[in-house]
Image (cartoon, rainbow, N blue to C red):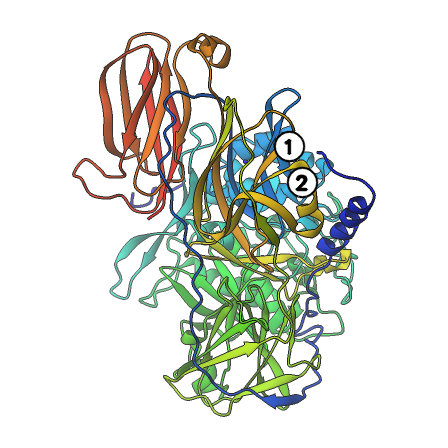
Amino acid sequence: MSSLLSLEAGKTGVKALLFTLFILLIASQLAAEPRGLTTRELESDGVMTERLLPSPIVPIQPQQNGMPDINRDEWIAVDSLQIYTWLDAGKTLGVQYNFVNQSMLTCTNMNPLTTAARQAIAKSPDWIKPPLTQVFYQLTAYDQDIWADVINSAVDPYVDEIAFSIAHSSSQYLSSIYANPQMMLENAQQIYAADLHLNYVQINNYGSSISGGDYYSTTAYLKRNADGETIEVDVPRDIYYWYIVHPKITDEIPAYIDPGIVESNTTHANNIADPPVGQFWRTFLYNVQEGNYPVLSDTLMQCATLFNRDGTPGDALRAVQWWVNNTMSFTSNAERPHQPVRIYRKHFGRCGEYADYSAAAARAALIPCTSILSISTDHTWNEFWEDGWVQWEPVNGYINVPLVYENGWGKVFGSVFEIRSDGLFTSVTDRYSEGLASISIAVTDSLDRPVDGARVILAIYESGIRVDMIDFTDNQGMVTFPVGENRQYYMRLESPVGIYPSNPGTYAMIVDNSVNGQEYTFNVEIANALTVPNITQTAPPADPSQDWRFMISFAAPYQLITGVSTWDDIDIVGSVPKCYKKIDQAGSINLLMTDADNYMMYLVAQEANAFHVMQNVPYGNALFNIPADQHWYAFLDNGCHVANTQCVTAGVLYEHFGASNQDDMLYPAGLALLPASPNPFRTGTDIRFRLGKDSHAVVGIYNVKGQKLRVLADEPLKQGFNRLSWDGTDFNGRQAGTGVYYYKVSAEGRTLSGKLLLIK
């Protein structure tokens, strides 16, 4: 390898029936459109039923909630729970106080996590833990253990690549007969095997599963700029994992494929076969010799740079392009395969096959690559990442000429979008249209409340009304489409609340002829009202003894616009996967505390009498003195959204007010940490720890890169419980920004650490 430049009780009878109905309701979801472009068409009857007129949009802001300071000096922590996950709409997660043995248990309406799943989550990088936890919650215990074992048995440097691939695979796929755990390992191993032999790229590992924390890997490349200078480019973390590591290209089922079997245009799953007959695309395309066709690994062996912007030969991008065109011919027959392995064996196809094949070949060569689509004008091509995304269409020899379609082919695009491996569409229209407008739509129910996760379908007139782009509304019910100029636009939307226009499959006309620079805004009101939780706020129960309590601090640091994948061959199992778009805006969540009867009623009917209620808030903090006479529940709930998932981080502390002679029973001898509180925090947090003896202690604050921001103590401290406060500032008094930080306590020959979330 050449060196590069440097986280039970209830009534019977009616409530049992309600619970059954609840499960059936949860199982229903939006129907996805069938796959289009070179295979099945997106269905539309092409009818426009009404004209929607522009109107101003008033943004809807989430409710705010303060975070009061809480005095905890004389309480002893007995147990704690850290929550860090993506919480789907309608899901709950929290704790139960069990009065029989005075213990704290996890409560949820999702599948409980197995021991193996918890171990896999703990082993994975911090930034992968939320989606990994979420996908494990969706799986049965049997399937959790299967996929957790892949992570738990993996060794570095493969752990993060395997954990990411599992975290960002759908539960439909992971629980299907088509998913093979061996493939996840082979996928990671082949990435590193290719790295050993390619001179233009190097994988850099930042930390490991042993060091823990926010460890990750990425690639660095050598490239030549327009002046002929060789420079090094580091690939952003998300680009590496989504566009090199993920084992899925577009809509195919990631699987071992028998290349000799003609692929069904209906299921695209009839050629899935176990090894050794079945082949995985990353290894097959890179290594296999097919007759007299060139071998990709041999083609890349002498390449010294990724891409030469000065036009000189010898770069890897042009080598992959040469290999694609020398192993493929542009034609088609009745078979339109999605699997790169089968496309390779056929050695011919049209734009759909070429785009999938080119993306797979580039990723096998460790070049980030994705597919670009204009479904309304029926064409697809690629982009590769070099120091930003670059247009690429190997079959025509196009590199970095994005306006060739508009100015050379005469295509006037409505929308052009990139399709990610999970089916998420992201507009790239600005790169392929000289003129650009925007269409913003606010979706509300009949009571003027925002409808999140509504599926908004944009269409243009292209020999009839044709689907052009699909996106989903955010927590405020908003969606915006960047669009090309000189086009007529139509829309329809679908949501669990209802559809618009009211006749299925029809469209409302919204723009006659789009004008460059124009912003078009519309309000769409669905005729029905959202079903929202029916929560009656009650006073907390009296607790004369005040000897047990819960302390909860929580936040929703970001939201995930959640939709259903338009195209995914795994829909043959009977349900459609979701796709998630992270929005760097605070999300919102509910907090409720109830008795057992009301907890069960909330699960089955979203109705309860509760106390310490916080609804639709981005963060919060509560304390509950627990009467030790029955079960009590404190839980976070994403019942404030129709569809959108929220990232949730929380700390639950279970405390006892008792004499100091309990210390030895509650804590091991020597240094011990108590959970920081509040955490998450805004203006300050307390770091608490116990010393087994008088000791010199060093307590510091660090950012995710391991850089020290503050020293809170470097001095002798007394035996017992100690508390230090951090106000969120660094050595120079500058305020730290929103994000994850770490604290370390070193004493008695040991160092213990914990994680903090600062929200500004």
Which residue is drawn at the image coordinates 47% and 14% (left, top)? Answer: 667
Write down the quadrant of residue 261 in the picture: bottom right
> SS class of the residue under badge 2?
helix
x and y percent of residue 507 in the render? 63, 84
Write down the quadrant of residue 291 in the picture: bottom right
Three-letter code, disc 1:
Asp
x and y percent of residue 656 in the render? 49, 20
705 versus 102 height, above or below: below
x and y percent of residue 438 in the render? 43, 79
Residue depth check, mark 1 versus mark 2: number of the one nearer the observer: 1
Sequence order check, earlier mark of 1 and 2: 1
Q: Calculate the distance from the C-alpha at mark 1 to the C-alpha at mark 2.
A: 9 Å
374 versus 142 height, above or below: below
Q: Nearer the viewer, residue 104 or 130?
A: 104
Write down the quadrant of residue 100 in the picture: top right
Label 2, residues with CA under 10 Å away: few <14, some 14-19, many ≥20: some
Q: Which residue is mark 1?
A: 149
Would residue 172 be visible to someone looking at this image? Answer: yes
Q: Which residue is mark 2?
A: 181
Label 1, residues with CA under 10 Å away: few <14, some 14-19, many ≥20: some
Three-letter code, disc 2:
Pro
> SS class of the residue under badge 1?
helix
354 versus 18 height, above or below: below
x and y percent of residue 40 in the render? 71, 73
Identify the disc placed on residue 499.
none
Q: Nearer the viewer, residue 141 or 311?
A: 141
Q: Nearer the viewer, residue 368 or 648?
A: 648
Kindly check if marks 1 and 2 are in contact, taking CB atoms under 8 A apart as contact. yes
Would residue 365 be visible to someone looking at this image? Answer: no
Q: Is residue 46 left or right of residue 699?
A: right
Instruction: Return the residue found at the far left.
Output: 732
